[in-house]
């Protein structure tokens, strides 16, 4: 099915560094600073935050990608030199707020990764719920070489995808992983050919949009929190979330449809 994307209205239409379009339930946000390889400066992090707390009411899933040859070159290094220690803390917390709005916002987010996915670009990708990588994607954390540290949630999120030891290797040695290594390590969920990432992301987005909203809520909000809990606490919260989801009318209708042979079976293809 072809999707008819139109420029998004409201606040999303006013963002200068993010191009926002919408087709039905899918919102597509593009980092739009290709001349700077989509490096994230203070204005862009603020616009990412604004976008995710102002998604249109009818949006049910978002896709984020990068304009030009790269997904994102991370922190705009032009901004770093003049900051005091306390300004540095404030800066990092602004990134946390923006990526929390993305990860714990209203809708699941799929990212499309190509070219450089480095530093803060990998931190952004790791906050999304699913990552589709194109063959050109490469992953690095050059903070080690730049004399800085991650500040956009990377030390909390990247080890949860690929392990603290791999992240330490990337930061200590400047190791760069290519797209197929990234796929094996869990940095991406899907690996597709060059130029195929958006189509794959939109296909996934269409499926995600058909899920019951409470199920998507449970997956994006409850699942990562449960995964961080002690087993006994996690099991308890799972019971609550499960009962809440099952109690919803949509769940009852969908289970009834399967029992009445009106709903699809699970199949391999
Ligand atoms: C930038 C940035 C940037 C490009 N900040 N201006 N991130 C890094 O250490 C990655 C630094 N960037 C690179 O290694 C390369 O630029 C790329 C591999 C991403 C792309 O290479 P290429 O050959 O396509 O582009 P380029 O010629 O290097 O860059 C084009 C322009 O973008 C150039 O500016 P121009 O004015 O000379 O045209 C670059 O200076 C500019 N540019 N990347 C500022 N990052 C919350 S804490 C997160 C901490 C971090 O993210 S640290 C990692 C920072």
Image (cartoon, rainbow, N blue to C red):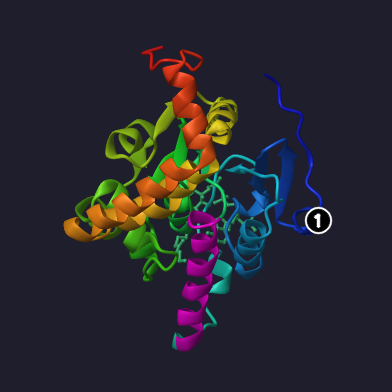
> For the N terminus, which image quadrant?
top right
In the shown orientation, is residue 213 left or right of residue 14?
left
Up the image or down, 171 lies above or below 250; here it is below
Residue of label 1: 10
Residue 115, given in percent of the width and then of the height, sits at 50, 39
Q: Is residue 170 visible?
A: no
Residue 28, given in percent of the width and then of the height, sits at 66, 42
Residue 145, given in percent of the width and then of the height, sits at 35, 63
In the shown orientation, is residue 101 left or right of residue 152?
right
Task: Judge whether residue 92 is colored magenta.
Answer: yes
Seen at 57% across and 72% down, the residue is 79
Element class at badge 1: helix
Q: Residues within 10 Å of mark 1 (few under 14, many from 20)?
A: few
Seen at 31% across and 39% down, the residue is 186
Q: Is residue 34 visible?
A: yes
- 190 or 226, which lies in front? 226
Seen at 48% across and 49% down, the residue is 217
- Main structural element of the magenta stretch: helix, strand or loop? helix
Seen at 65% across and 46% down, the residue is 30
Residue 42, given in percent of the width and then of the height, sits at 61, 70
Highlighted range, magenta: 86-105
> For the C terminus, which image quadrant?
top left
Up the image or down, 152 lies above or below 203; here it is below
- 171 or 219, which lies in front? 219
> In which quadrant of the rendered view does residue 10 lie?
bottom right
- 122 or 228, which lies in front? 228
Task: Judge whether residue 203 is colored magenta.
Answer: no
């Amino acid at each position: 099915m072809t999707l008819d994307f139109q420029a998004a209205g409201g606040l999303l239409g006013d963002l200068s560094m993010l191009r926002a379009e919408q087709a039905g339930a899918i919102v597509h946000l593009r980092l739009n600073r290709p001349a700077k390889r989509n490096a994230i400066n203070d204005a862009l992090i603020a616009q990412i935050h604004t976008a995710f707390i102002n998604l249109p009411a009818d949006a049910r899933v978002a896709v984020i990608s990068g304009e030009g040859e790269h997904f994102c070159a991370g922190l705009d290094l032009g901004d770093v030199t003049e900051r005091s220690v306390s300004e540095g803390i404030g800066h990092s917390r602004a990134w946390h707020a923006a990526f929390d709005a993305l990860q714990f916002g209203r809708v699941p987010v799929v990212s499309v990764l190509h070219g450089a996915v480095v530093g803060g670009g990998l931190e952004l990708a790791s906050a999304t719920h699913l990552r589709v990588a194109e063959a050109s994607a490469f992953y690095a954390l050059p903070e080690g070489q730049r004399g800085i540290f991650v500040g956009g949630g990377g030390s909390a999120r990247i080890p949860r995808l690929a392990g603290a030891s791999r992240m330490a290797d990337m930061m200590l040695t400047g190791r760069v992983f290519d797209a197929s290594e990234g796929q094996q390590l869990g940095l991406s969920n899907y690996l597709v050919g060059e130029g195929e990432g958006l189509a794959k992301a939109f296909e996934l987005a269409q499926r995600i949009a058909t899920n019951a909203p409470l199920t998507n809520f449970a997956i994006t909000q409850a699942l990562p929190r449960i995964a961080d809990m002690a087993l006994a606490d996690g099991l308890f919260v799972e019971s609550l979330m499960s009962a809440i989801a099952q109690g919803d009318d949509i769940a009852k209708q969908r289970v009834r449809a399967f029992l009445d042979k009106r709903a699809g079976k699970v199949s391999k293809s």
